[in-house]
């Protein structure tokens, strides 16, 4: 088994899982509130779900076992997000929070792509590059709410 395939695919999977989880939680937090950004959140959630499913298929194809994001990481993100929403749930504040998260993710996946580019299967590398492009596009989409 190619360890690089496993490492990069695991990173993609955890990024998608965490993106799905935190976006779902943010949608719940904004339920009943008059935020225009909710439409963008639905798009982000749908995309993270697609990356999650695609990574699961690649785990199967390469016979790699996925490892889920830990409970503490999810709770930490959830508490931090709830605090942000309580302090200021304006579209500008929500966009700022999302942009910061997406930017961190984009920087990390970019480093991973550079690190593994010549070591991993093209299907995994392509998925990583698509995830990176998705994050960059969402950052640009969210700027209009600032």
Image (spheres, grey):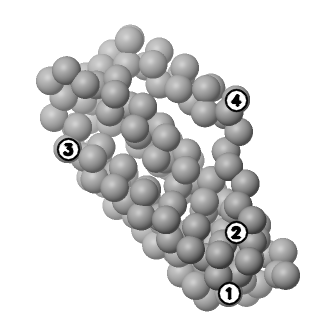
Residue drawn at (70%, 81%) of the image: 62
Rendered-image quadrant of the C terminus: top left
Per the model, the C-alpha gap separating discs 2 and 3 is 30 Å
Q: Secondary structure at mark 3?
A: helix
Quadrant of the image for the N terminus?
A: bottom right
Q: Which residue is mark 3?
A: 39
Mark with earlier residue (3, 1): 3
Q: On the image, numbered disc 1 is attached to which residue?
A: 121
Secondary structure under badge 2? helix
Q: Position of residue 32 (x, y in %)?
A: 19, 21
User: Disc 1 or 4, which lies upstream in sequence?
Assistant: 4
How far is the residue under mark 4 from the one under mark 3? 28 Å
Residue depicted at x 37% and y 19%: 85
* Label 1 secondary element: loop
As measured in the structure, the alpha-carbon distance from the residue carrying label 2 to the one carrying label 1 is 10 Å
Could you give the CA–CA distance between mark 4 and mark 2, rounded to whole angstroms? 22 Å
Q: Name which residue lies at 74% across and 77% down.
A: 63
Task: Give the class, few, some or many, for how many residues have Cα within 10 Å of label 3's Cα (few <14, many ≥20).
Answer: few
Q: CA distance from mark 1 to mark 4?
A: 31 Å
The residue that label 2 is drawn on is 8
| Residue with the mark numbered 4 | 72
């Amino acid at each position: 088994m190619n360890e690089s395939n496993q490492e990069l695919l695991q990173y993609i999977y955890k990024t998608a899982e965490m993106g799905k989880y935190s976006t779902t939680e943010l949608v719940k937090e904004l339920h009943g509130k008059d935020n225009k950004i909710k439409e963008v959140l639905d798009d982000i959630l749908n995309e993270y779900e697609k990356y999650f499913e695609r990574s699961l298929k690649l785990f199967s194809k390469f016979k790699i076992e996925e490892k889920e994001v830990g409970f503490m990481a999810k709770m930490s993100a959830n508490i931090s997000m709830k605090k942000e929403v309580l302090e200021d749930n304006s579209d500008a504040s929500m966009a700022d929070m999302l942009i910061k998260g997406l930017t961190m993710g984009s920087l990390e996946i970019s480093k991973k792509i550079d690190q593994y580019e010549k070591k991993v299967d093209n299907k995994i590398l392509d998925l990583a590059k698509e995830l990176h492009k998705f994050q960059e596009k969402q950052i640009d989409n969210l700027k209009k709410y600032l």
